[in-house]
Amino acid sequence: MNSEEEFYDAETGLESDDSCEVSFKDAPVYEGKQTSNGRVPSENGVWERRTTLPSPMFSRNDFSIWGFLKKCIGMELSKITMPVVFNEPLSFLQRITEYMEHAYLIHKACTMSDSIERMQLVAAFAVSAVASQWDRTGKPFNPLLGETYELTREDESYRLISEQVSHHPPISAFFAESLSQDFVFHGSIYPKLKFWGKSVEAEPKGTMTLELSKHKEAYTWTNPMCCVHNVILGKLWIEQYGTVEIVNHSTGDKCVLNFKPCGMFGKELHRVEGHIQDKNKKKWRVIYGKWTECLYTIEPKVYEANKKAEKKNGDSKKHKQEQNTGGAGDADELPDVQETVTMIPGSTLLWRIAPRPAHSTQMYNFTSFAMTLNELEPGMGGVIAPTDCRLRPDIRAMENGDIDTASQEKERLEEKQRAARRERAKDGEDWSTRWFHQGVNPYTGTSDWVYAGGYFDRKYSDFPDIY
């Protein structure tokens, strides 16, 4: 068994230790309007999506992570499985569905006649797709092999299907399409985790592909790196960094976005900066903003002139900062940088993040969109595939506030998955994916998972019993 396999199938045997018990008697309670399953009551017979979860999150402050990790001294780090209290009540398949929260940007791009204007909106969509990760320090549940998730949003004119196509390594494949055949958006993600002592770094390996049917264009990119700081000591906080290169394979246009690391003084925290160039490398637009807030576009000459003026005025301030900066502590301190993005005159707003619900901090820092993802809509139970993660009992129990049942069910499902794999190995059988097959991305030439079609025909039979 390799180390990755041990990480995803780990059993520590620590669950019964008294030092790992969690007390939730002081858990914060959301005082808002409580409804059945968190749903807003229907008005005039029209069903509305819920705006809250059935139960607020448990307080993680009552749990000593050191009390857990000290029992693991001498064990391989790859064998450590975090307690369910550090999860959020969504599967990773639902988490990647959050890419579609700002799907209106794709619809808008489809209406543009100019390729540079389309690239601006595609870039805004790529940035908006990771915006929901802001302050989301809870870990989504690892999908079980064969697990699926579907989402149809007629109000946003798209539908999506995803499937966990591999367990070792863990690979999630998804396919979204416009209900009016304007676009398809698809990809596969293999999150590689690295532990650096005080932080966990996630590399979302895999290619995102967006095809605009009317313009016969295809765009590809990979997402930035994500790092969660202070997993052992201090306040958890998230940053994203790295270069994201969006390529229009039809025109040769390219958008290069730099997700900036925090830096010593936190000035660059959450900042994104880049440019759009054509196939001759001529720069047409500069894009700037924050992935947690908004994104603007501006002419390169105007942007550069503003940067020069800023640099001239900022040199003296920087010198004073360097003189007054103390030494670093044991934790990776979250910089106290609260200012919003300053709009440069002549800029055009491409995207602004939607405000989160007032009670979001008590609901795992979910967005309004995320609140709806695990809801079983009326009549859905007999329509969705039996492998849909809305039907996972551990996630459902956690959403309902039953942490003990969630932990027990999670352990049961993981053991059931291990037993099924042992049976397949005994019989010499390989796992067969149902909705995706391994192939080649036609635009990048790299390995990819391709949607086979047929999911929404609803002809479900011979499904594995994974729950």
Image (spheres, rainbow, N blue to C red):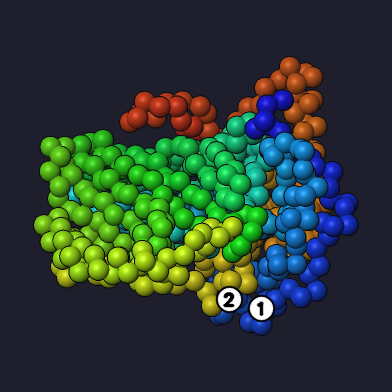
The quadrant of the rendering that contains the N terminus is top right
Q: Gap between marks 1 and 2, in whole Å?
A: 7 Å
- At 22% from the left and 50% from the top, the residue drawn is 275
Does residue 465 appear anywhere in the picture? no
Vertical order, 318 against 93 (above or below): below
Does residue 11 appear anywhere in the picture? yes
Q: Quadrant of residue 268?
A: bottom left
- At 63% from the left and 82% from the top, the residue drawn is 32
Vertical order, 73 against 369 (above or below): above
Vertical order, 198 against 32 (above or below): above
Q: Position of residue 414 (x, y in %)?
A: 76, 41
- At 52% from the left and 68% from the top, the residue drawn is 368
Q: Residues within 10 Å of mark 1 (few under 14, many from 20)?
A: some
Query: Which residue in the protein does label 1 denote?
Result: 30
Kindly indicate whether the residue at mark 2 contacts the one at mark 1 (C-beta within 8 angstroms): yes
Query: Which residue in the protein does label 2 denote?
Result: 359
Secondary element type, mark 1: loop
Looking at the rendered structure, the kind of residue marked 2 is His
Looking at the rendered structure, the kind of residue marked 1 is Tyr
Q: Quadrant of residue 3?
A: top right
Q: Position of residue 31 (x, y in %)?
A: 66, 82
